[in-house]
Amino acid sequence: MLKQQLSHKLQQKLSPQQIQLMKLLQIPTAVLDQRVQEELEANPALEEGELAEEDEITEMLRNADDDKSDDEPSDSEEIDDLERDETPPEEEVSLDEYLTDYMDDDEPSYKTRGDSYNPDEEQKAIPLAVESTFHEYLEQQLGMLDFKDEREEAIARQIVGSIDDDGYLRRESEAILDDLVFSQNVSATKEEVEKWLSRIQHFDPPGIGARNLQECLLLQIDNKRTKEDVSDETKAILKISRKIISHHFDEFTKKHYQRMQRQLGLTEPQLKEAIDEILKLNPKPASGYVSSTRNTHYVVPDFIINNNGELELTLNTRNAPDLHINGQYRDMLRSYKATTKGRRATKNEKEAIMFIKQKIDSAKWFIDAIRQRQQTMFNTMYAIMNYQYDFFVSGDQRTLRPMILKDIADITGLDISTVSRVANSKFVQTEFGTKRLKDFFSESLQNKDGEEVSTLEVKKILMDIIKDENKRKPFSDEKLKNMLLEKGYNIARRTVAKYREQLNIPVARLRKEL
C-alpha cells in the first residue's frame, strides 16, 4: 500500500560560491595565474588590471555592508528595477548594437601594463635552455650506423624508441618483434634484434640499452677498460670490479663486504678500490639528458617571511590579481535602464539583461572568492608564523613545536578542512630556504621531563646522529633508540625504524662503507 508522508529534514549544502572558494584555496600560487586566465576567457564581464576610474560594482564588493546612496542606485538595483518595471510596452528598441559592439571588441588582455605599471614588480619569466632530448641524441647516433636497407634501420629505430627515460630497455625482444610487425609491418628475428641492440649499447652515454642494473654497470666498466688513457693499475681494479658485478652482484647490493673479500681472496684496500670504481658509475645513464616526457616543476612560494627585527609576513603578489567588472557591461545596464524607462522591457531586452546579470554575478563571485582566498591564506599563515615563531627567527628545526591542524583552526576560527586546504601544496619563503607548509605540522611525544616535543625535532636529531656515525660500523635501530633515550627522548625501537624510513635512511647494514 502506497502512502504519502511529509517530513522535515535539515541538510547542509554548499553554495556555488563556497565550492569555488574551496577549489581556489586548494590550488598553489603557481596555478592561480592559469585559473584566473581561464575565468577571464570564460567570462567577458571580468577584467584584470587597475581601474582608471572607480568602478561602482567593484566598490560594492569592497563595501558590501555599507549603506547605499538613495540617489545613485547600484547596477544590481538597476537590474531589479528593469525586471520589476510593469509599465505598458512601447516600440521595441534594437539591442543588437549593444551586444555586437561588445562582442566584437577584443577581450581584455591578461597581465596588461596599466598606468601604474612598476617594472620592479614585474614577474620575471624563468629562462629555459633549449636542449636536445635524450632520444633525439640517440637518433643522431643512429645516423652513424651503416644500414643495408630500410628494414634494418626500422629495427634499430624501434629499439631506440623502446629505451626509457632512464636509459634502460625494459621491453622484451619478443615484444619489440610484435611492435615491428604491427606498427611498421616489418618482420624480424630475435637474433636481429639482439644484434642491433648490441650495436646500440655502444652508443654514448655508456650503459645505454641495458636490460637491468647489472648489465648497465657491466657495460660502463667494459667501456672504461677499452679507453686508451686508462692505466694498467686502473684496468686491474676494473677487472676486479667486473668480477664483483658479474659473480657477486647480490652480495654487493647487500653490502656483504667480508664475504666478498673472502670469496675473491682480496685485501680490504683492494676491495675498497674496486667498490669505489663501481660507485663512480651511473645507474641511470640517461639522467644527464633532457627527457621528452619529464616536466620540470619550479616551486613558487605562496608566502614570504622576512625578519627585519620582527617577523613580517606578505603574500606573493601573484596571489592578488587586480580584477574588476568590465566597464562596458556596466554601461550596457545603464543603457537598458534608460531605454526601458517608463515602459515594460521586451522579451529580447529581458534576455539580454539576464545574460548581463549572470555574467556580472559570476564575475563578482570570482572576485569575492579571490579576496576571501587571500584573507584566509594570510590569516592561516600568520597563525603558523606566530605558533612556530622560534623556528622562523632561528631556522633551527629543533625549535619546531608540535602542531596539528586543530591548533591553527582554533586560533583562526577556521574549519580544520579549510586549514588543511591552505597547508597542502603551499610554500613559504624564509631566510632559511623555501619550506612546505605541511612540514610544519607534526605530532608530539614526551621527553624524560614530561614536556611535549615535536616529532620533527626527534627526526632532526636522529638524522644528525646517523650523519656523524662511523660508516664502517653504523648504528643499529636499537643503538639509535638508546642514544635518543640518553638525550631525553622516550622512544621505542619500532618508532626509530619508522622515523628512519620516513627520512629515507636505509638500515645499518646498507649504510656500511669500507
Image: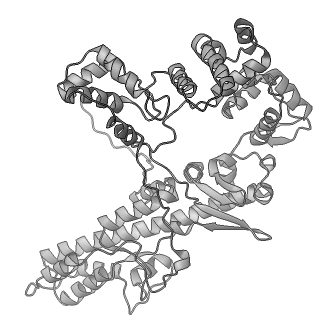
Identify which residue is drawn at 43% across, 42% down. 291
Q: In front here: 65 or 492?
A: 492
Q: In front here: 497 or 410?
A: 497
Residue 218 screen position, x and y as percent: 54, 21
Identify which residue is drawn at 70% across, 30% down. 505
Residue 163 screen position, x and y as percent: 39, 30
Rendered view: 235 above or below 484 = above
* The quarter of the displayed image where residue 345 is located: bottom left
* The quarter of the displayed image where residue 245 is located: top right
Which of the colour schemes (rainbow, by chain, secondary structure, one colour) is used?
one colour
Rendered view: 76 above or below 459 = below
For the question of whether residue 506 can be seen, the reply is yes
Rendered view: 36 above or below 250 = below
- Is residue 275 shown left or right of residue 361? right
For the question of whether residue 64 can be seen, the reply is no
* The quarter of the displayed image where residue 103 is located: bottom left
